[in-house]
C-alpha cells in the first residue's frame, strides 16, 4: 500500500451551465519529494469551497485508488486522466473499497488516519470532467474512493507507505456502505449493523436508521 501522489488545490471560480460556481475540486500533484502538512481539516495548500457538504473532520482527506484509473481510461478514452482529477488528496495503490473497513486506522508518514465513509459525488465532479453524466457514472461504477479523518496531524509525501495500525472489528467495508446507500440488494442484517457503526459519521447512521425503520414498517 503506497501513496503515489499528494494532490492539493484551493477553491476557484469556474463557469458551468452559464453560472459562476466556486469549487475546490481542481487538485494538482505536489511536486517532487516535498512533504505536506496534514491537519485535522485538510492539507496545507488545499481547501474546499462549500463547507456545508465538503470537508470537515470526517472528510478531511479524500483518497482514490490508482487502480481505478485504468477503468476510467477505458470508459473515457478521450479524457486525459492526470493524477488528482477525481478531486482526491491522496492517490494510492494497494487498497480498494472492498478491502478497507469503516473504522480502519492507518499510519502514513507521521500522520494517523481513520477511514470514515465512501465518497458520494456532487455535480462538481461533472464540472471537473466537463460532462454532466459523470456523477451518475461515478456512483454506478462503485469506484467511489473513501475519506479519512485525521487522528494525529503530521507530514506525508509521495512514496510513503500506508501501514495498517488496526482493523475495525465490525468488518463493514467502504463497499458495503455504498451498496447499502444505492440499495443494490436487500440486506437488513448489514443495514442494522451499519446503524450501530460508531466510526461511521452520524449523518450516515441516521440515514440508515431511517431506511431500517422503513423496512421494519
Image (tube, rainbow, N blue to C red):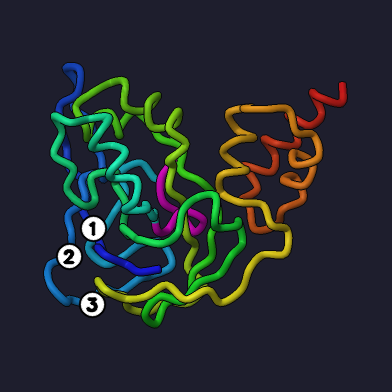
Question: Residue 82: image x %, image y %?
Answer: 17, 48
Determine the residue positioned at 87% across, 21% down.
217
Marker disc for residue 8: 1
Is residue 183 in view? yes
Q: Earlier in the sequence, mark 2 or mark 3?
A: 2
Residue positioned most to the top: 18
200 left or right of 35 in image: right
Mark 3 burial class by Cα count in 10 Å: few <14, some 14-19, many 20+:
some
Determine the residue positioned at 22% across, 63% down.
45
Considering the numbered disc 2 on the image, is that residue within a helix, a strand or a loop?
A: loop
Residue highlighted by disc 3: 35
Residue 35 quadrant:
bottom left
As for residue 54 lying within the magenta part, the answer is yes
Considering the numbered disc 3 on the image, is that residue within a helix, a strand or a loop?
A: loop
Q: Could you tell me how far apart the alpha carbons at marks 2 and 3 are, in whole angstroms?
A: 9 Å
Mark 2 burial class by Cα count in 10 Å: few <14, some 14-19, many 20+:
some
Q: Could you tell me how far apart the alpha carbons at marks 1 and 3 are, in whole angstroms?
A: 12 Å
Residue highlighted by disc 2: 30
**Residues in magenta, as a range:** 53-61
Q: Decide: marks 1, 2 in contact (CB < 8 A)?
A: yes
Q: Decide: marks 1, 3 in contact (CB < 8 A)?
A: no
Determine the residue positioned at 47% across, 60% down.
148
Determine the residue positioned at 61% across, 73% down.
166
Amino acid at each position: 500500500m503506497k501513496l503515489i501522489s499528494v494532490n492539493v488545490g484551493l477553491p476557484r471560480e469556474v463557469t458551468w451551465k452559464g453560472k459562476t460556481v466556486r469549487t475546490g475540486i481542481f487538485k494538482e500533484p505536489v511536486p517532487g519529494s516535498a512533504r505536506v502538512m496534514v491537519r485535522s481539516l485538510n492539507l496545507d495548500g488545499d481547501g474546499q469551497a462549500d463547507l456545508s457538504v465538503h470537508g470537515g473532520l470526517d472528510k478531511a482527506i479524500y483518497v482514490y485508488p490508482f487502480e481505478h484509473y485504468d477503468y476510467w481510461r477505458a470508459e473515457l478514452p478521450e479524457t486525459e486522466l492526470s493524477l488528482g482529477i477525481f478531486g482526491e488528496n491522496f492517490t494510492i495503490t494497494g487498497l480498494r473499497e472492498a478491502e478497507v473497513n469503516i473504522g480502519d486506522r492507518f499510519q502514513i508518514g507521521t500522520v494517523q488516519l481513520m477511514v470514515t465513509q465512501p465518497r458520494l459525488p456532487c455535480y462538481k465532479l461533472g464540472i471537473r470532467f466537463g460532462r454532466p453524466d459523470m456523477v451518475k457514472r461515478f456512483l454506478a461504477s462503485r469506484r467511489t474512493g473513501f475519506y479519512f479523518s485525521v487522528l494525529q496531524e503530521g507530514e506525508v509525501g509521495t512514496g510513503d507507505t500506508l501501514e495498517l495500525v488496526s482493523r475495525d472489528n465490525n468488518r463493514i467495508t467502504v463497499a458495503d456502505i455504498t451498496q447499502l446507500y444505492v440499495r443494490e440488494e436487500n440486506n437488513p442484517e448489514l443495514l442494522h449493523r451499519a446503524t450501530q457503526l460508531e466510526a461511521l459519521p452520524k449523518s450516515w447512521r441516521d440515514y440508515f436508521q431511517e431506511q431500517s425503520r422503513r423496512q421494519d414498517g
